[in-house]
Amino acid sequence: MVRPPISLRRIDGYDGQSVTSHYRSHKTERVERERVDVYTFIGRMMQQVFPKGFQRIRSYGVQATKTVAKIKGLIFPFDAFIQC
C-alpha cells in the first residue's frame, strides 16, 4: 500500500462543485488555501495513481544500487583527495 496523494485533513471543504484544501507553501513558508473545480481536483489526484502492475522506480542512474556498487571505488578516492 502506498501513501495517498493528499491527506484527508488537508481537504477543508467540498460543496459539490469545488474542493477547498490547504497546503504549506515552500516559497512563503505560510499555509495557503486553494479552491479548485472538482474535475481539476480529481485530475490532479489521478496523476498520482499508477496503472495496475506498474512498478514504481525509486532511484535510477548514479543513485541506483547496482550503479553505486560499480562506481563506489571511483567516487571515494576523489572525496578523500578533496577533503585533504
Image (cartoon, rainbow, N blue to C red):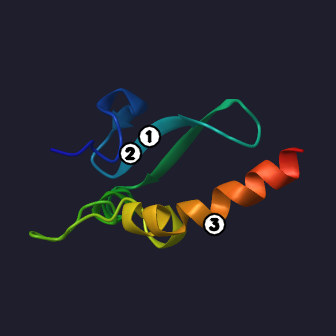
Q: Residue at x 70, y 29 (%)?
A: 30
Q: Secondary structure at mark 3?
A: helix
Total numbered labels: 3
- Seen as rendered, the residue at the extreme right is 84
Q: Which mark is residue 74?
A: 3
Give the mark, 1 or 3, whose residue is nearer the N terminus.
1
Q: Is residue 81 left or right of residue 67?
A: right
Q: Is residue 21 left or right of residue 34?
A: left
Q: CA distance from mark 1 to mark 3?
A: 51 Å
Q: Residue at x 44, y 40 (%)?
A: 20
Q: Which mark is residue 20?
A: 1
Q: Which mark is residue 19?
A: 2
Which one is closest to the eye, mark 2 or mark 3? 3
Q: Quadrant of the N terminus?
A: top left
Mark 2: give few (<14), some (14-19) or many (20+) Cα within 10 Å. some
The three-letter code of the residue at mark 2 reads Val
The location of residue 15, given as percent across then percent down, is 32, 41
- Seen as rendered, the residue at the extreme left is 52
Vertical order, 61 against 40 (above or below): below
Q: CA distance from mark 2 to mark 3?
A: 52 Å
